[in-house]
Image (cartoon, rainbow, N blue to C red):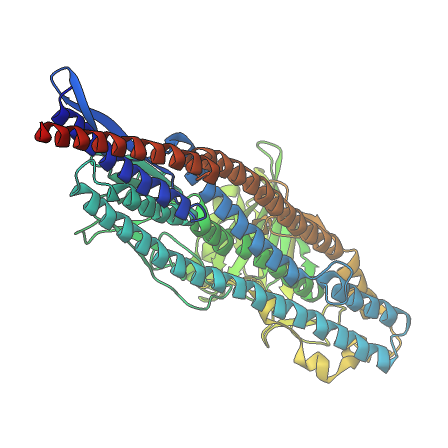
Amino acid sequence: MSLSQALSAAVSGLQSTQTALSVVAGNVANANTPGYVRKTANQVTTGTGDASIGVRIAGVDRELDTYVQRQLQVETSGGAYADLRSQLYDRLQQVYGQPGSASALETIYNNFTTALQGLTTSPDSTAIRSSVIGAAQALTGQLNGMTQSIQGLRTDAELGLDDAVTQANQAMQAIAKINQQLGGMTINDATAATLEDTRDNYINQLSQLMDVKVVATDHNQVTVFTNSGIQLVGNEASSLSFDDHGSLTAQSVWSADPTQRSVGTIVLKAPNSDSGVDLLATKAIRSGTIAAYVEMRDQVLPQAQAQLDQIAAAMSSALSDRTDAGTAVSAPPQAGFDLDIGGLQTGNTINLTYTDTTTNTQKQITIVRVDDPSVLPLPNSATVNPNDKVIGVDFSGGMTSVLAQLNSALGSASLQFSNPSGTTLRVLDDGSGRADVDSASTTSTMTTLTGGSAELPFFTDGRAPYTGAITAAGVQSLGLAGRLAVNPALVADPSRLVVYQTLPPTSAGDGTRPNFLYDQLTSAALPFAPQAGIGTAASPFAGALPDYLRQMISQQGDAAASAQSLKSGQDLVVQSLQQRFNTTSGVNVDTEMTNLLQLQTAYGANARVMTTVRDLIDLLLKM
């Protein structure tokens, strides 16, 4: 080897070692920096022909296990989803109160029924009557407050989505900017590795918000997709928008139809595009904090509200609804029943049972009074009964219109409807022998405190009676728990807890109404809509109110426990993957110090070669 070759090799060695030393120093300095990936200098030999005469740094590499990194991004998204869900479930549990505590819903309900039980033994006690009213007001106040809290949680989720979309946009724009910078760099540019670290941090931020898939492309660039395949970032970033609706109510619902939607949705627009994709309608986001917020806002919390509404509706209907059987009539060869429908209000029902003699099959019909024709026809799910056929009838056109609608709907079933007088509805078989009317009744809501029977409008929807009305705005039960009140007329005159008629007047010690109230609220088998998540459409829950209340609290408790269990399991997975990632990509200071000593030795050796070459050149010049 010539002296010039030796000198060139030593100089390249010094330069390469100096770069490697700066890489090691950077590793040590960033040992505790979150997201920092350990760097190594990629050193290659240089030469002419078959002779190696030096070394150079081809680039700075990141020590990265890409498989573990991808898994960590996936599980980070799942961990963020599980953590947020668990937090929101914990807050929901606080709404229900600690079981057994004075502020728990079940405790307050039991206080109310205990006061009613006292009234059954002492109907004439004014003190006990007052205690019943007070306990009832405490119960309605609790339901009102719980509704406000649940809708407050939904509002927090709405605001959380707005903030998450802002963070996602910032992360996507940063990723795109770094992609553009990397695209303009040479492959051995030492700053590229640092930029890749920064980009990975933004990708990690994005993966906490939603589930993403990262695909490497040329020039150290990446393309980011949702796991459903929709591109988020390339050399340019797409943009997300969220139409925040502010404070939500029980009536605020998400819908793919923008005219029906009253909560925010997330729309993705590609760069330079005016059209967008609704990521919630396409179910493109399946994990991360965004998915958790959406699930809680649109599913879990509305279901919790629906269960409270079912309790409020059941209490109201159980005390105010009266069922009157029809009067049997015969007009040979026809037979059937007369029903007085004058007291029916919107949402009240006519109940028919008839036998189809051609198949010997008994069938049930529920006719629902409707005053808003825009909701017709009604689905069979409009009632809790899974075995009935529901027919909505618009009463706004008077009796003639009602008869026309009924005969049109049920004429093929061999049933005939007529109006012999006044508000009487007569239903008969058609005399052909193909059908027999087995029973008929009406279920109507009592609106006065002294209607001559034990039923009374104890609870009201604000100041209006609760009748189960169905309108274009939805069913009356939606959000009822937030509007439920003790009838102001009853608060003004607690004697009506006992007195149910004035002529002849009810005795002050009569236990008829107190016993009815207590039995209805503690032991009567009541139907509950399965849409609230308890029971199924094929087998809806039917039982006493306390049983439904316990079932609700148990279900919510189990859901919260499951959310906590998922969080614990997901946290363990993320921690395990993070440890594996750190083993490869993290900085071990002891290892770096060993590398530093080796590089110092190499630096000294190259310096010694340069010194020797200098001495030899000096010697040659002196000869």
Q: Nearer the viewer, residue 284 or 28?
A: 28
Quarter the N terminus occupies: top left
- Residue at the spot 23% in from the left edge and 50% down from the top edge: 177
Q: Nearer the viewer, residue 274 or 73?
A: 73
Q: Is residue 296 above or below residue 581?
A: below
Which image quadrant is residue 350 in?
Answer: bottom right
Q: Nearer the viewer, residue 196 or 206?
A: 196
Q: Farthest residue toward the bottom?
A: 492
Residue 239 at x, y percent in the picture = 27, 53
Q: Is residue 178 above or below residue 128?
A: above
Q: Farthest residue toward the top?
A: 50
**Left or right of 211 in this view: 414:** right
- Residue at the spot 57% in from the left edge and 51% down from the top edge: 86
Asked whether residue 476 is in view, the answer is no
- Residue at the spot 38% in from the left edge and 32% down from the top edge: 598
Q: Is residue 358 above or below residue 337?
A: above
